Amino acid sequence: MANAEIVPVGINDLPLIVELYNEIFRPGREYAFFTHRLGTQRNPLLLLATVQKRPVGFALGYELKQNTFYCWYIGVLADFRRAGVASQMMEAMTAWARDQDYQTIRFECYNRHRPMLHLAIRQNYNVVGIRYDADAEDNLIILEQNVNEEAAD
Ligand SMILES: CC(C)(COP(=O)(O)OP(=O)(O)OC[C@H]1O[C@@H](n2cnc3c(N)ncnc32)[C@H](O)[C@@H]1OP(=O)(O)O)[C@@H](O)C(=O)NCCC(=O)NCCS
């Protein structure tokens, strides 16, 4: 375990998350991309992961529909991977979603995001569908977790 500290942060810390995003994902995104999406969705959640006070990862999500919370992005800096940081963030998101009375967390993932697919299975997510993303010209796998269900293993 990385023993990361996972904290919910406010919109004031979004620049830090955008910086992490741009270190982790390609292509990079402008600040406005995030403010626009998060500003137009219900109940946004911003999680920051720090190790020895250094920001190393983030997760972003928002309400998709009454019972379902959507995990939009999750990322960890390359040097801090395979130490349980993303697992800690997903567990924190699950606990938070349960507290907020959501029943399901959903996210979508391309086949090429293999580590994320491995992680999702470890975190007790089920594959519930697939949809074609015309912009990316690629399939997206849809995964869901029942936040009230214990992991099987
Ligand atoms: C996906 C990602 C968030 C995982 O972060 P992480 O902190 O390394 O994940 P964890 O350490 O919590 O992994 C937990 C388990 O998931 C599985 N897993 C994670 N990365 C894996 C990999 N590269 N290969 C195989 N299994 C992997 C393993 O079962 C792992 O447990 P183990 O290390 O004990 O074997 C990270 O690789 C990342 O930021 N990738 C780039 C961004 C991305 O693709 N995000 C997803 C799309 S939004």
Image (tube, grey):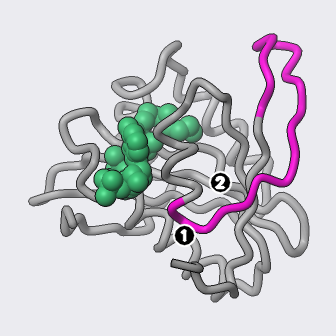
Q: Which residue reaches farthest front? A: 153
Q: Is mark 1 within 8 Å of ligand 1?
A: no
x and y percent of residue 71 in the render? 65, 54
Queried whether the magenta region covers residue 131, the answer comes back as: yes
Dot label at residue 84: none
Q: Which residues are magenta?
A: 122-140
Q: Amino acid at mark 1?
A: Met
Residue 62, given in percent of the width and then of the height, sits at 71, 58
Q: Amino acid at mark 2?
A: Cys
Beta carbon of the mark 2 residue lies under 8 A of ligand 1: yes
Question: Which numbered marker is on residue 93?
Answer: 1
Residue, far left? 52
Q: Give the side of residue 3 with respect to residue 113, left or right.
A: left
Which is more toward the observer, 87 or 118?
A: 118
Label 2–label 1 contact, CB within 8 A: yes
Label 1 crowding class (10 Å Cα cut-off): few <14, some 14-19, many 20+?
Answer: many
- The Cα–Cα distance between marks 2 and 1, rounded to whole angstroms, is 8 Å
Residue at the image position 49 percent from the left and 16 percent from the top: 26
Residue drawn at the location 61% of the way across and 68% of the way down: 124
Q: Quadrant of residue 30?
A: top right
Q: Which mark is residue 71?
A: 2
